[in-house]
Image (tube, rainbow, N blue to C red):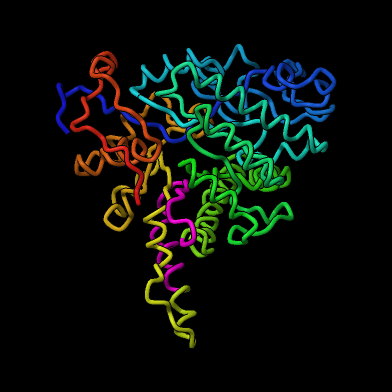
Amino acid sequence: MTTTAKTARECVIDADSHITEPADVWTSRVPAKYRDDVFHVVRADNKDVWELRGQRLTPVGVTAPAGWPEFPPEYPPGYEDVHPGSYDAGARLRYMDEAAIWAQVLYPNVAGFGSEHFLKLGDDALKVLCVEAYNDFLLEWSSADPRRLLPVVATPFWDLDATVKEIERCAGNGARGILFTGEPQRYGLPVLGAPHWDRLWSVAQDTGLPIHFHIGNGGETLELSTPERYQHHGVNGAQAYTAVSLFMKNGVQCADLITSGVLARFPKVQFVSVESGMGWLPFMLEAADYSWLGAFRKGRERPPDALLPSELFRRQVYVTFWFEQFAPKHFLEIIPVDNVLFETDFPHTTCLFGNIQETISSGLGHVDAAIRRKILWENAARLYGIEDPPASWCDAVGAAQLHATVTHEHRA
């Protein structure tokens, strides 16, 4: 990549960031009769806390510690203490300019990384209303600059008719992706490969919207971060265990996906494993291929046109990474680099904040510029159809100019 100066920063597309939802997301959007029965914020113990029908869920500051001088388990106590870009779209765009981030893919917090917390609402009609209210908020928030703020919309996945209807509604209103769970069986629903889900894959294929499995999409974060583990393993041990468990769980979900038959039946649907890293990919793909082929060695004949699980992955599945240093230094020759997206996870605990360029330089500085550009920019631009920034933006943020026009066609 050609740069205009040695100090020019690399502009990036951030494939995983989060919105710390404003307090009125649901109370201002559902009918008045439901306002006491939806997610809302209360002030308790000098902290802003999300609550549902008297049950305390999570403090607001837990989802936005970027820039906070303390370390977990200490978090910003309220909205006035978190980075304003976590909840305000205008402030988010200003922060993105400061960080040389052209576009960000946007994920939720309160309702869960797979929309699973909507199930706590109980009432079937209210659950769907709250999904719609969140998506309306997200699409409105992203309209501050739809070139740069890319909404991944929630789904009422427990109701397939409502899910298909909501995807079709949001696809026409600016949605860039679909949020789903990689483990529907956790909720008493059919596994990914069951025909039950074919209408979901079809609407994703028809709309061109990729489907996203964010870590924690099965709702397992709380069951991993138990008080007993914090008591006996300490904060560091409990958080490290939880993080690694979530990353590896997405690896298991990817293995399930690429061996489920879904990708063969729906060859144009794209999937993204979000916030899961990439270092586990070589082993997962090798193990999936080895075991899959092993079944044919035991007397079954492999169809001549059947693709290996790893080949299906390369065709249709992406992963995101941010902090890793070992994998980009040692595994890139065997990792499918066309399938890797860069993220910052802003404004979460593990996010890159104030160290984006340093992390890129440390992890990818040795990598050929063309490969680095794929990971930091081109793969995401192709997947989400992101237009290039004007040269004036690159100049204004001190970022290197893009060396070529990005092709925005989806992979076949």
| Residue lying at 44% horizontally and 46% vertically, measured from the top left | 277
239 vs 198, nearest the viewer: 198
Residue 151 lies, in percent from the top left, at 51, 30
Residue visible at 16% across and 26% down in the picture: 3
Whether residue 261 is visible: yes
- Compared with 74, 206 (above or below) is below
What quarter of the picture does the N terminus occupy? top left
Q: Indicate the position of residue 299 as horizontal and vertical percent values.
A: 48, 88
Q: Check if residue 273 falls in the magenta segment.
A: yes
Residue 261, position as x, y percentages in the image? 51, 64
Work out whether residue 229 can be spotted.
no
Residue 215 figure quarter? top right
Residue found at x 85% / y 20%: 33
Is residue 321 shown in magenta?
no
Q: How many dots with numbers?
A: 0
- Asked whether, in this view, residue 216 is left or right of residue 55, the answer is left
Q: Residue at x 74, y 31 (%)?
A: 57
Q: Residue 21: name its quadrant.
A: top right
Provide residue 124's location: percent of width, then percent of height: 80, 38
Query: 136 left or right of 334?
Result: right
Residue in front for this viewpoint, 120 or 200: 200
> Residue 371: which quarter of the image?
top left
The foreground one among 132 and 51 is: 132
- The residue lying toward the viewer, choosing from 74 and 291, is 291
Q: Which residues are magenta?
A: 264-290
